[in-house]
Amino acid sequence: ISAATRIMTFHPTKEEFKDFNRYIAYMESQGAHRAGMAKVVPPKDWKPRRTYDDIDDLVIPAPIQQVVTGQSGLFTQYNIQKKPMTVREFRKTANTDKFCNPRYADFDELERKYWKNLTFNPPLYGADVSGTLYDPDVTEWNIGRLNTILDTVERESGITIRGVNTPYLYFGMWKSTFAWHTEDMDLYSINYLHFGEPKSWYIVPPEHGKRLERLAKGFFPGSAQSCEAFLRHKMTLISPSILRKYGIPYEKVTQEAGQFIVTFPYGYHAGFNHGFNCEESTNFATQRWIDYGKLATLCSCRKDMVKVSMDLFVRKFQPERYKLWKAGKDIAPIDHSKPTPEAAEFLTDGKSEKETGELSDSSKAETQEKRGEAEAGEEQKANTDGGEEDKTEMLKRETDGAKEKEEAEKGGPEPGINSSHPYDVQPEPSNIAVSPKHEPGINSVHTCDVTTEPSDITISTENEPSISSAHSCDVQPEPSDSTINAEKEPSISSAHSCDAQPESTDIYINAEKEPSISSAHSCDAHPESTDIYINAEKAPSISSAHSCDVQPELSNIIDPKHEPKLQDQAVSEEDGLDGEAWARPLTQLWQNRPYNPEREREYNREMGLRPPYCAVCALFQAHQQSEGGESEPAVVLPRGQMRTKPLIPERCFTTTTEDSADVQPSTPHLEEDGTSLLVSCSLCSVRVHTSCYGVAPARVSKDWKCARCKANALTESCCLCSLRGGALWVHVLCAVAVLEARFMNIAERSPVDLSGIPLQRFKLKCYYCKRRMKKTLGCCVQCSHGRCPTSYHPTCAQAAGVIMHPDDWPFVVYVTCCRHKGPVQSELSVGQKVICKNKNGRYYQCEVIQLTKETFYEVNFDDGSFSDNLFPEDIVNRDCAQLGPPPQGEVVQVRWTDGLVYGAKFVAAHVIQMYQVEFEDGSQLSAKRDDVYTLDEELPKRVKSRLSKASDMRFDGMFGEKKVQESKRQRVINSRYRGDYIEPVIYRAIME
């Protein structure tokens, strides 16, 4: 991290402390905003409150329990609301043995313990308590009365936004956490720690905020797809070790009681409390913020998210840009290094001390440069157990570091920082470590010189001398000089193949099993046949730098082309599957059929002409279609080449199941607009994105060949599924879908390490091809809903249209089987028999008698709440029946169900199809499609339990006044997360 983006600490004098806005402007003149955060230590004798002894009875109305799930530095936090409690009760709970902080020597040790124990023993957090602890007569830095330009909103519009332009109190305990986020509307924030244990903060400088967003979207693609600004949900925790691993600069600082922390616009921050404490905070603004507010990305999925209208600010403070902004043309990029306009007085050279407001030189600013050390437990292990880092990666990292250093040096002195200025900035020596430390480990490179003559490969291990398989190699060889030697065939010089076909010669591999050694050796082998292919560096001979590591459990995967018995089976098998429409094009591609190169080329050509045009992206095409998303228009290049946006996020290629793996950011060969070049193999016609297949666009020529064709291994098939065709060695599609498969070289998408795949996965039988395959081939992925046992080969699922989409880390692909696929609701017609809920609370059969369309209005009320089912007549200050809906953003008056009129802003009008239904007793009601079920639809359990088929319900009118007794209402998880798997212990905590 450069010196310009380090956290500064300021010590204002009494005089300087009097004017809050002026001091913030001074801080920016010193470059404090570059870090995104600054610490301010008030004058020694300043106190916001005389005593805190009288707040024990203050009520925390909605304390939350913070349940955290995740591993290896990536976590999701769920907030479970608990019953109200007083400050006295909260403090008593926080200080119990269960919730108090552990013993620690220094803050670094406590930080390691925090990340190590984050998922255990969920703490409570008394967050978002409206109110202030300041005495009314305190005028300096009073969080409730800062008088910044944000207060313009309240003064001129009368709108109060709790916690934004009013203060909030936060009562913390050990491990209570605030996840990575920027402030609402990317505002400034001020936080004062009234009393109690310290609070640790992490900050990513605003100029690197986009990098953090990209990283988070890569790790949590599911969340990113559902909401562009999902980090505003404050549920995402990313540890410092992950930030270091991906080269994202960050700083950390510890705030103690009696100190202020100021965060600046677009500064992503997170942190945790060391123990029981109380903090007060609010948002504020300067003129510099206005440009941030205009460009702030807002959460689209939660209606209660804060939104501040920028109209008022632009009109008042940027009148010359107002018309341009209203026309949507004011889109100048933000310069994060530029201080606020109010800082101009401190940046003017030649002014005397008196001219600058008689500010004394006793005010000091020091820099906090202490960076995060290695985290505890598995995170520490993650950075040290990986062995010696690949030299090219190390060289790349050193080069990147040198570039960053050069850029920092080229930047020169920060504007406005003048050593002769009345305020001084005194940087301290830094011990910041940008890159993780690399300890040299054992670099065991096993060479594999294999003859092209037919040969069988057999294992014998010391642990299990009885194992003698003709189709497997030890996955965890001892790091020694073990080699496999055979005659070299000079005619084969391919960089991709070591061909050993089984017939006569036996090769024995003897290796001691050492379970304690975590093997990071690659396996680009294909155990469905005994031909073992190993991706090697380009060389005249076939000496491979990768080891021949194939799982013993793969020994039951056999290619029928080498087994006469299986060929007989293939002929006599039932072909029931081929009758299905999706399976017909695949008839000649099953691995138990003779190899048909023409049919494979034809299939690859056909797939390359359909969206998404890439054999790898096809994995997520069914999901793309189900979401109604049209494929991105292709960019047509000269010579007929095309570029399109890949459907697979980069994170799907970089997922690793090993804690010790040191995953580095890859270079996915994407253009600036997010598109990637499509290339076709000149032999097998498979079409792929260069980014998905890991080939540099510069290396692509007219006669480009895929890895398999380049190695002339045309008869080879994927060892993870039962189909031919597609992007091989192992199908890249299969390697992405199977969680435990791992790309050793992420940028090149090869070789693929299969050693982490558990034996149980190879025993799963594919829902689609188990009827045609008497021998279990490949390994399957299972439906992601709960404990659903339905399993598929990735290629079978893709061909059959099973919906798969990117999942949140640590998972890769979310699979939805046919049973869990949401019902496709058909349109209803007049006279159709349906099932609907009667006004007595039970469900009955009824008849659709009329189809109507109704208009509902959506508004946001002034208190932050919203409604999306208002009738037009509920708007009292406008005749909507005559004039239609108000313009978006117009202030309206709404008559609510309590008869009172409330102020609100109009959002949108929604036209909804309504169905008028009539029950057997003659009663009628109007219902939405979601509340009506056809007779052939699967009914939810809640409907089945209240379904009545009584035909004599016409006599129920006499009991009309009688209320239906309902069972005790159970607490349920928010429907947004109902599909997620939650550990039983956490589930019980939620249900308490």
Image: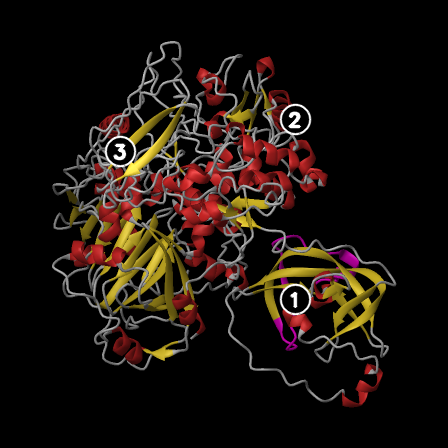
In this view of the protein, which residue sits in the foreground, 327 or 953? 953
Mark 1 nearby-residue class (10 Å; few <14, some 14–19, many ≥20) = few
Badge 2: few (under 14), some or many (20 or more) residues near its Cα, within 10 Å? some
Q: Secondary structure at mark 3?
A: strand
Disc number placed over residue 606 in the picture, else none? 2
Which stretch did the figure color magenta? Answer: 878-901
Please name the residue that numbered disc 3 is placed on: 510
259 is higher (above) or lower (below) than 341: below
Q: Which quadrant of the structure image shows residue 636? A: top right
Q: Are marks 3 and 1 in contact (CB under 8 Å)?
A: no
Query: SS for tag 1?
Result: loop
Image location of residue 917, percent across then percent down = 82, 68
Q: Is residue 269 above or below residue 257?
A: above
Give the Cα distance between marks 3 and 1: 58 Å
Q: 685 or 52, which lies in front?
A: 685
Q: Residue at x 27, y 39 (%)?
A: 461
Question: In which quadrant will I find the N terminus?
Answer: top left
| Badge nearest the viewer, 2 or 3 | 3
Amino acid type, callout 2: Glu
Residue placed at 47% from the left, 31% from the top? 730
Q: Earlier in the sequence, mark 1 or mark 2?
A: 2
Residue pictured at 44% horizontal, 24% vertical: 503
Q: Residue 208 location, x and y as percent?
A: 34, 39
Q: Which mark is residue 940?
A: 1
